[in-house]
Structure formats: C-alpha cells, structure tokens
Image: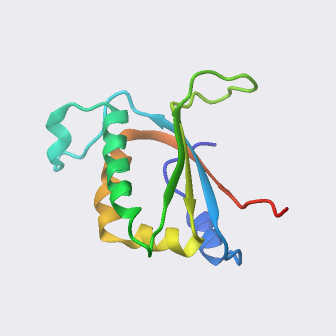
Amino acid sequence: MPALQPTTDQMRTFAKDAHDGPIVMINLLKFHDKARYKDSDPEKAENLTGEQAYNRYGKGLEALSSDPKIGLKVLYAGEVNRFLIGGDEDWDRVLVVLYPSRQHMLTMMRDPRYQEAHRHREAGLKHQDLIETHQIPG
C-alpha cells in the first residue's frame, strides 16, 4: 500500500539490517496535481505542480551526491508511460537510486541539507512505494 513516509517499524528494521553493502532503492512516485506547501513556505504563492515541487527536491539531492559521506547516485529516472503487466497503481515516475550502504542513506536523512530539500518532496508527492534491493551475487 503506497505511503509517504516509512513507519517506525520499517525505519527501525532498515536501520538495524545487517547488510553492509550497496543498496539500490526503487522509488515509485505519484505526484499531487498541485504542490501542497505549508502556508509558511515561500513557494506556496508560486502555484507549482506536485511534479515541479518534487523536482526541487531532486535538485537538493543532486547537491548531496558529491558528498562522499552520502554518495548517492541516481541510476535511472523516467516517466511512467503505460503498464504492460499489472497496473493496480497509477505511478507518474520511477526513480532508481544507488547508495554505497544503508549507513550512507541514513547519514543523508539526518543531513540538514536533505531536511531542507525534503519539504519539496512532502509538498509534491501524493504517495510512493520505496523498495530496497540488494544485488544478487554472481
């Protein structure tokens, strides 16, 4: 079931997982038609779409990608065109992001630059699924 944030249990399990290698996060994203900024946000008056707000979040992540303590790398970003199989959810975009380890991702989530960019994510996203993957050896 799509959501906006991990539950406390999901976050706890993620943080304590023993896998110490790279992780790839697959993001399935659905945007609001209109961004939902807080009244106190300067962007509130800009009348942005959800996708435009989320793109500002993406720009914030780009700035973090050069920080070796975070080390994220966007492997793929694309608009959803159609479903060939399935289609129970109506996604707008797929985003695939590599982190050197889960600790790198956790470091990013605590970083003040990420937290500042995160408000654009909250304003733009209606919901998402976020799938953690590990490469299959061999």
Q: In this view, does 25 lie to the left or right of 124?
A: right
Q: Residue furthest right?
A: 138
- The residue under the point 43% across, 68% down is 108
Q: Is residue 2 left or right of residue 73?
A: right
Q: Position of residue 78 (x, y in %)?
A: 52, 34
> Is 47 left or right of 101, judged from the image as shown?
left
Name the residue at 23% across, 46% down.
38
* Place of residue 83 in the rendered image (x, y in percent of width and height, measured from the top left): 67, 23
Q: Picture quarter containing residue 90? A: top right
Above or below residue 9? Residue 69 is below
Q: Which colour scheme is used?
A: rainbow
State which quarter of the image contains the N terminus.
Answer: top right
Exactly how many numbered labels are in the figure? Answer: 0
Residue 81 screen position, x and y as percent: 57, 22
Q: In this view, does 32 lie above or below 117?
A: above
Kindly indicate the quadrant of the structure image that contains residue 84.
top right
Quarter of the image with the C terminus in it? bottom right
Along the viewing direction, whichever of 22 and 102 lies nearer the viewer: 22
Asked if 49 appears above or below 77 in the picture, the reply is: above
Q: In which quarter of the image is residue 137?
A: bottom right
Does residue 63 sit above or below 120 in this rendering?
below
- Which residue corresponds to the image point at 42% horizontal and 41% vertical from the top-left? 125
